[in-house]
Structure formats: structure tokens, C-alpha cells
Amino acid sequence: MTINKTTRSSSVIVDVEKLRLQVENRPRNMLLLEFILMTTATIPEILSLKVEDLKEMKAGERLPAYLGTGADPSPVFTTEMKQGFEKLCTKYQPPMEEFLFKSGKGKNALSVTSVSRLVRTWLTQSGMSDRYNGVRGLRSHMGKMLVNPEKSLPQKKNTRPSRGYTLPRVKTKPLHEFVFQELEKAIISGRIPPGQRLATEAIARDMGVSRIPVREALRRLEARGFITTRPNWGSVVNTLSRENLQEILHIRLLLECEAIEKAAVRVKATTISRLKAINAMFARLRVQNDPGKLLAANREFHLMAYRDADSPILLEIINQLWDRVNPYYNIMFRQSIIPHPKAGIDYHAQLIKAMAGRDSEKSKHWIKADLIRSADFVLKLFDLHQEKSWQMD
């Protein structure tokens, strides 16, 4: 029997609404269902999301880039996702650093197995278990009829005639790549502190993967200089030191001064406008005292300033050095021992003025002053607490 295309589409819409009704009183489940239906992200990618990743997002904006699939663009934060997220925040008031889809036991995210079991329960309770075999069956059957990066399902009108449905291409990241990126992000942000031991089995258990991709990820982290592996002990996040910071500063001064000199003589008006907007945001975040967002805004400002240097390899190396220095900046913005330095905002403003005048020498002067002042502040903290743990807010 041939199934009419309109009938097939209508059937899918009905099934989606049945599932939404099934979870509408459980905000976390409601949001999880939308991510499963409306993105091509893998389940581990979805489970890696934290509350802070969606806090400032508006419906229609693109979600974090790592939720995209291969060459496809990152998916859109739909109206349904926004509603689910707002209900979740209203009901539970979760902390910013909490996993969006947290397990009921402890602080870890749900496991892939738990999500599979949850979806099967929804399908059974909605009377659809005979048509959809778990997460994979649900996505395969519905395909790109639902995964629309621009609009959510109810808005999809006046589209060109299709073949009924198509299946999404499988372009998921290798597990070791996903594990590496998550561990790197946790170390850079300070969530995994210097000196912390990284146990392969514990990481594998928390992330719902085998030990093989974890071992590969740890090897890559060691090659990047983030961790050290000791015989009969395991891997440890490298401890921060004065010597290490001074070496990073020396290299950054060479490269970032070179980048700003090149960028200043060819800077675009749009870049100047963007720098002003980022620095204004940076100043607001200073008042709000949000360390995570301050770190991100500071990095975005510097990388934007170098953008017009037209030296992609140079910028790639600078970006990697920012990864190495980020744990030090994490200390600077989170510590509560001495007042935070505020000169950075003024240095940024002076840099914008110099770049707007295409003055490469003055631009170099202000970028150098900004980098040195930040490093000196962290070194002062080292002097104050040579033998003590960092006091964080």
C-alpha cells in the first residue's frame, strides 16, 4: 500500500504532539525531547550542555556550534526549546554550572543508556512503541522532516514538494574527539583544577563511553601540555607556575604584538564597531562580577582585534596560547583576595582608538600593556599564596 505524502507528514505531526503532551509537565524531559527531535546532535553532545549554555539565548538564535553535524550549520534554539528551558529554570532554579540534563543521582549528566530508556518509556506510554524503536528509530523514521535548522515543525509551511521524508546523514564526531573537547574545555575553564588526577575509568563511567576514547583523549591533552601522565599513578592536570606563565607571556607578546600591528593598518570599520560593543559588554560584566562571561568576553575582544591581520596560521597559534593562559585568567577573575584590576577596560578603549586611527605603534603599545598588566596581577597572587590554595568566590 502506498502512503500519501500528506498523510505521512500529518501522521508525524500527530505523533510529535502526542510525545509533547506526554512530557509537558516535566520541563527537563520536555526540553530533552525537543533536542532529540529538532537537532542532529548526538546524544552525548546534547548531554554535555550546561544551564549557562542556554541562559542568554533567544528563540531563533543558533545553538552552540558543536551541536552541528559535519558541514551542517548548528541548529536553531526553537520556541519550544525556549519554553521548555524557561519552565525548567522556573521550577528547579538550577545553578549555571549544572548539566542541563542532570541525573537524579548526584551532579553528573544523564547517561546515554538512561536517555534511551527514557525515550522508550515515552513511546510506550504514548502507544507508539510499535512504530518507533527508541531514539534511533524515532530519529530515523522522522528524519529531516523534523530536523529543520531554521524553523520548528508547526511553522513549516509552503515548502517545496519532497519525497515524503529523507534520512539524515550520519556525521557524528569520533568519541575520542568528543571526550577530548569536553576535558579540554573543563580544564581551560577551571572546572577541573590544576593538580587534579584524571582517572580513566571514572571519566569513562561519567561520560558513558569505554576507556579507549578516554585514553586517546588523555594522550592528546598531554601532547597539548595540559596534563602529565605519571607511571603507576595516572594523568594529572598540570600545576600552574610563575615560570610557565612568564614563558607564555613572552611568546604571547611576540605573536600578539605582531598580529595587532598587521591588523591596525588594515582594520575594517565593522571590526571597530564590534570591538566597541564587546568592550561595553566587558565593562557591564565587570559590574555583574560574572567570571565565566568575563573570561569569554576578554578573549573575544582580543581575537576580534587581531582578525584583520589576515594571518590565519598566526591567529590559530595565538588561539592555542589563549587556551594555555586561560587557567591563569580564571584565577584572576575568580579570586577574592585583592580587588580585580580594572585597567583592562581602559586599555581596550585606548586600543580601539589607536586602531581606528590605523596607528600600529600605539596599538602595539596598548596590547602590550594589557597583556603585561594581566600577567603581573596573577604573579602578584602567586606571591601572596605560594603555599596556599587559591581562594575562589
Image: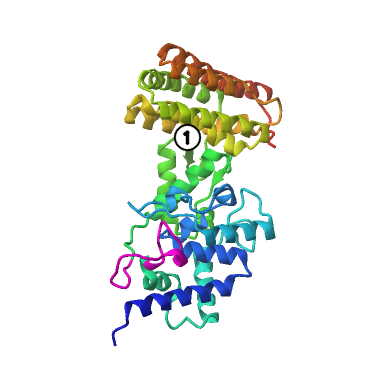
The answer to whether residue 125 of the structure is visible from this angle is yes
Residue at the image point whose x is 49% and y is 28% from the top? 275
Q: Residues within 10 Å of mark 1 (few under 14, many from 20)?
A: some
Please give the name of the residue rendered at 48% of the width and 50% of the height, measured from the top-left corner.
61
Quarter the C terminus occupies: top right
Say if the magenta span includes residue 151. Answer: yes
In the image, residue 64 sits, relative to residue 246, either above or below, namely below
Q: Which image quarter: residue 76?
A: bottom left
Where are the magenta residues, as a range? 145-167
370 relative to 179 in the view: left or right: right
Q: Which residue is mark 1?
A: 323
Q: Is residue 97 above or below residue 21?
A: above
Residue 367 x %, y %? 48, 19
Q: Quadrant of the N terminus?
A: bottom left
Residue found at the very far front of the displayed protein: 158
Q: Residue furthest bottom?
A: 1
User: On the picture, is 168 further left or further right than 325?
Assistant: left
Residue at (33, 57) in percent of width and height: 171
Q: In this rendering, does residue 239 appear at all?
A: no
Q: Work out whether 23 lies above or below 228.
A: below
In the image shown, does 343 or 203 lie closer to the viewer? Answer: 343
Amino acid tagged 1: Asp
Q: Position of residue 134 (x, y in %)?
A: 45, 74
